[in-house]
Image (cartoon, helix red, strand yellow):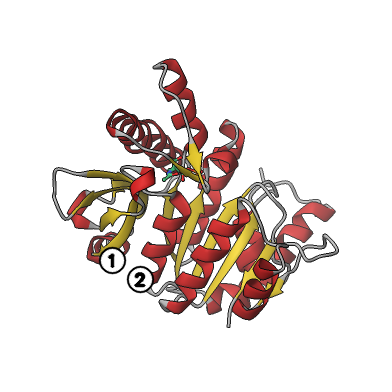
Amino acid sequence: MRPRNMNKDWKATARTLSQALPYLQRYSGAIVVVKFGGNAMGDADAMAEFARDIVLMRQVGLNPVVVHGGGPMINEMLAKLNIESRFVRGKRVTDQATVEVVEMVLTGLVNKRIVQAIMDEGGRAVGLSGKDDDLMVCEADDPELGFVGRPIEMNVQVLRDLFNAGIIPVVAPVATGMDPLETFNVNGDTAAGAIAGALKADRLLLLTDVAGVKNAEGEVMTELSPADIRRLTDEGIIAGGMIPKTETALKALQEGVRAVVIVDGRVSNACLLELFTEHGSGSMIRD
Ligand code: X2W
């Protein structure tokens, strides 16, 4: 039997849904690329919550694409194999042995874990890497980094085909080169930016484990322009691990992405908060 007494929580749920209507209308059919970093993956509950948010986006008519990282999982496997992990300017120095481990961990363990989590929440998901259907073709980023790729050619039709079939694409940042025997390890943020740019996505959400971009006073800035980003970078206020994210954001905007949001993935339902309420959950960068 249906419980009849209307306690406050149920009323709040109905009100929240009602208030989301303008946002649901605004984003109907929108393409949203979500970068899900290894540090944001957390435990099984965090993974399930992320997957539920993605399935909800699809259910209400958006076209989400998940592009994932998995740096900590690669580190763990390399340690088991006694292969040293070394980073230069935030990117992994990747020799032949390392690129094989990167491909196995990202396209195997991590990709399938996310695909399964989405299916467990009732969505349809298909995992692929940059190699599938030539989605992302790379050249070497920097000789010092070995097999680290910089995307030079994108073929995103496969993603549109999956959208049309109602399937959520889950992309591992591994790619081929102009020589198809080459394998490149691509930074997850870079891959997400390139995919969002090629799709001219409505939103690129970069999920991280920090609160957002901070100003000189240490306060999170909820809205920034590309000029603000350049100024804060010149002043050394944007530094360290934030630099690849803000660089990705500027490039994605240039390529036609409407807005990029650096989202605090530690906040519950961070993606929903960002898309379907007036309160964002991080820093939005747009012209
Ligand atoms: C990354 C790919 C994974 C990644 C790596 O090897 O760790 C490069 O550094 P997170 O979890 O998003 O950091 N690739 C070139 O980006 O993972």
Q: Earlier in the sequence, mark 2 or mark 1?
A: 1
Residue extending furthest toward the bottom: 287
Residue type, numbered disc 1 = Arg
Q: What residue sits 47% from the left and 55% below the top?
A: 189
Whole-percent x and y of residue 27? 51, 74
How crowded pointer 2 is (Cα within 10 Å; few <14, some 14-19, many 20+) is rated as many
The foreground one among 179 and 210 is: 179
Residue extending furthest toward the front: 144
For the residues bearing labels 2 and 1, Cβ distance under 8 angstroms? yes
**Residue at image mark 1:** 160
Q: Please tell me whether residue 283 is drawn above or below residue 46 in the rendered image.
A: below
Q: What residue sits 52% from the left and 72% below the top?
A: 250
Residue type, numbered disc 2 = Leu
**Residue at image mark 2:** 199
How crowded pointer 1 is (Cα within 10 Å; few <14, some 14-19, many 20+) is rated as some
Which quarter of the figure has residue 206?
A: bottom right
